Image (spheres, helix red, strand yellow):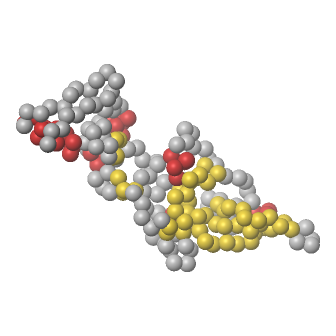
Amino acid sequence: MRPPDNGKPPYVARVEKIESDSRNNVKVRVRWYYRPEESLGGRRQFHGAKELFLSDHYDVQSAQTIEGKCIVHSFKNYSKLENVGAEDYFCRFEYKAVTGAFTPDRVAVYCKCEMPYNPDDLMVQCEVCKDWYHPACVDMTIEEAKMLDHFVCFECTEDDAKRSQNGFHSSPVSDSDEKVMLFLD
């Protein structure tokens, strides 16, 4: 929807109802999405560029303020998109505008930095423990991470070195890229 200030990005709302009055003025009842910077606490490092919060803020607007259509995906579906278009956004939180509270109030964290996943940031997955890491958090550039065929995190590398010192070795990576590890109690 068109913002009053042309220098701002369009507002995003979900149309709940369309109705016209006796003079044929079309109105829409909307439920607003907030951008992270419009919420209490503002934008955080883990918020994606296209992230929105579905709020409990409802309003009635003139249909004339509608600029176009966009798609607000679930976080899961957005993460699976091959190509993100200008009309694509995602939502993983609901936002209570008056209190600034979010639902859910907790979200999974990843990496040694313990930040929630940001779909705009590249992450690498350890082949052994399956944890995800930001390249910078494991002393790697994004360019280096993009060229990786395999990645084993520092903790798993250290664990493997300890097993090797005790005479137990992991098997080499096979042609099928499947890593087989032998662990003895």
Depicted 85 relative to depicted 61: above or below:
above
The answer to whether residue 54 is seen in the rendering is yes
Residue at figure coordinates x 20%, y 45% from the top left = 155
Depicted 177 relative to depicted 113: above or below:
above
- Left or right of 13? Residue 152 is left
Residue at figure coordinates x 55%, y 47% from the top left = 77
Q: Quadrant of residue 2?
A: bottom right
User: x, y (%) of residue 26?
Assistant: 84, 66
Depicted 110 relative to depicted 6: above or below:
above
User: x, y (%) of residue 157?
Assistant: 19, 39
- Left or right of 57? Residue 16 is right
The answer to whether residue 158 is seen in the rendering is no
Q: Nearer the viewer, residue 10 or 109?
A: 109
Residue furthest to the left: 166
User: x, y (%) of residue 108?
Assistant: 39, 57
Query: Where, quadrant-wise, is the N terminus in this rendering?
Result: bottom right
Residue at figure coordinates x 30%, y 55% from the top left = 113
Residue at figure coordinates x 52%, y 52% from the top left = 75
Depicted 156 relative to depicted 6: above or below:
above
Q: Quadrant of residue 56?
A: bottom right
User: x, y (%) of residue 84?
Assistant: 57, 43
Q: Nearer the viewer, residue 176 or 46?
A: 176
Q: Quadrant of residue 23?
A: bottom right
Residue furthest to the right: 23
- Left or right of 119? Residue 90 is right
